[in-house]
Amino acid sequence: MYRDHEDERVGGEEGRSRAAAPPAGETTARIRLLVVDDHPIVRAGIVATIEEQSDMEVVAQAGTGEEAIRMFRAHLPDVVLMDLSMPEMDGWTAVEAIRREHPRARIIVLTVYDGEEDIRRALDLGAVGYLLKDASRDKVVAAIRAAHVGLSEAPEKVLSRPGERATELSARELEVLQLISEGFTNREIGEILSISEGTVKTHVVSVLSKMSVRDRTHAVAEAIQRRMIRLG
C-alpha cells in the first residue's frame, strides 16, 4: 500500500502532490489519462490534481459509462480513473466492457464505495486499483504511476485475506440479484438481460447456494447487509 498523507485530499484547495515524480530534467513520455465521473466538480478536482504533475496529462473526460467507453476507444489512454455510480451505465459495466475490448487496459476505480464486495467485484472485472475519493492526492498520483508500469493496488482489507471471499458471485449473478431486489420476476429478468428464464433460474439457484440462504428474500436481505447491491 502507498503511504497516505491525510492533509491533502483529492479535489482539495491546499497543497500539491509530493508523490515520486521523474527527476528534474529527465524527459519521459507523459502518462495519458481518461477521467470518468458524473459530477463535474469532482471531475474538475481530479483533473486539477493530475495537471499539477509534470509527467501526466488528461486526454479525455467522461460523465457516464457509455461515454467512458467511447472516449477510451477514441483516445486509448494509458490509465483510466473510473467512478462506479453513474447514470445510464455504471462503472462496473464500463470496466468490463473496456477490458473486454482492450484486455491490457489499466483502470483504477476511484469511488465512495468501500464495501468489500464492491472492491472485489471491480478487481474481478479487471480494475488494477481501487481508491476511495477521500484518498490523498499523493496516493492517487502514486497509484496512477504504479498502474502505468503494471503494478496493482487494492485496500488492505482485501489483500490481507486473499483466501477469503465473502461470496463468489459472478458479475451476471450480481446483476440477477440486483434485479431480484428491484422486484422483477425470473421471466422479466430474462427479458432485461436477454437470457432465457431457465438460465435465470440457474443463476438464482447458484446465488442461493453460494450465499447459504434459503430463498430470494433472504438473499436480498443478506446482499443489502453485505453491500453487494444497492437500493433505489
Image: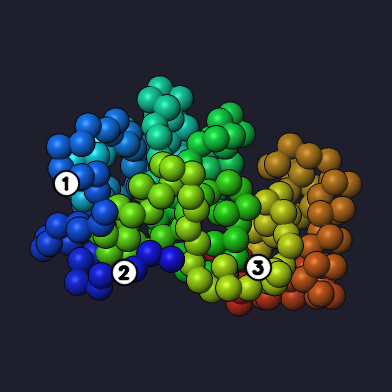
Q: Where is residue 33 drawn, in percent x and y?
A: 34, 37
Q: Where is residue 31 drawn, in percent x and y?
A: 32, 36
Q: Residue at x 58, y 41 (%)?
A: 96
Query: Quadrant of the rendered structure where residue 14 is?
Result: bottom left
Which amino acid, by three-letter code, is at mark 1? Glu
Label 3 crowd bin: few (<14), some (14–19), many (20+), radius 10 Å: few
Helix, strand or loop for disc 1: loop
Label 1 crowd bin: few (<14), some (14–19), many (20+), radius 10 Å: few
Instruction: Indicate which disc residue 4 carries.
Output: 2
Which amino acid, by three-letter code, is at mark 2? Asp
**Alpha carbon separation for disc pair 1 and 2:** 18 Å
Q: Nearer the viewer, residue 199 or 34?
A: 34
Helix, strand or loop for disc 2: loop
Identify residue for label 1: 52
Q: Residue at x 60, y 65 (%)?
A: 117
Helix, strand or loop for disc 3: loop
Q: Where is residue 102 drawn, in percent x and y?
A: 56, 30
Against 187, residue 205 (above or below) is below
Identify residue for label 3: 162
Q: Are marks 3 and 1 in contact (CB under 8 Å)?
A: no
